[in-house]
């Protein structure tokens, strides 16, 4: 999995690192930050 802030946008791109030509999920930075915070607070079990 690769995660990157998309330059000059307020978005984060997420893709499978083994399939660089495949689809990517793009989400707002705020949504990604909220997701990460929920993981840190153990609201999601990985």
Image (spheres, grey):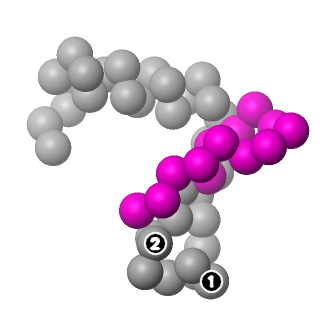
Q: Where residue 37 appears, x then y in whole percent?
A: 36, 20
Horizontal side of residue 4 vs 37, given as left or right = right
Q: Is residue 12 magenta?
A: yes
Residue nearer the viewer, 35 or 20? 20
Horizontal side of residue 6 vs 29, given as left or right = right
Q: Where residue 14 appears, x then y in whole percent?
A: 53, 56
Answer whether labels 2 and 1 touch (C-beta < 8 Å). Answer: no
Relative to 41, say whether 29 is above or below.
below
Horizontal side of residue 19 vs 24, given as left or right = left
Tell me the quadrant of the picture where the C terminus can be found. top left
Relative to 34, say whether 8 is above or below.
below
Tell me the quadrant of the picture where the N terminus can be found. bottom left
Q: Where residue 22 appears, x then y in whole percent?
A: 58, 80
Q: Main secondary structure of the magenta part?
A: strand
Q: Residues within 10 Å of mark 1 (few under 14, many from 20)?
A: few
Identify the element where label 2 is drawn. loop
**Residue pictured at 60% horizontal, 23% vertical:** 30
Q: Where residue 43 appears, x then y in whole percent?
A: 20, 23
The span from disc 2 to disc 1 (Cα, nearest Å) is 9 Å
Q: Which residues are magenta?
A: 1-13
**Residue pictured at 65% horizontal, 34% vertical:** 28
Could you say which quadrant of the image residue 44 lies in? top left
Give the residue at mark 2.
17
Relative to 39, say whether 5 is above or below.
below
Give the residue at mark 1.
21
């Amino acid at each position: 999995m690769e995660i990157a802030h998309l330059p000059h946008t307020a978005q984060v791109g997420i893709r499978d690192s083994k399939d660089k030509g495949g689809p990517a999920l793009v989400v707002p930075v705020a949504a990604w930050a909220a997701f990460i915070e929920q993981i840190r607070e153990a609201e999601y079990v990985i």
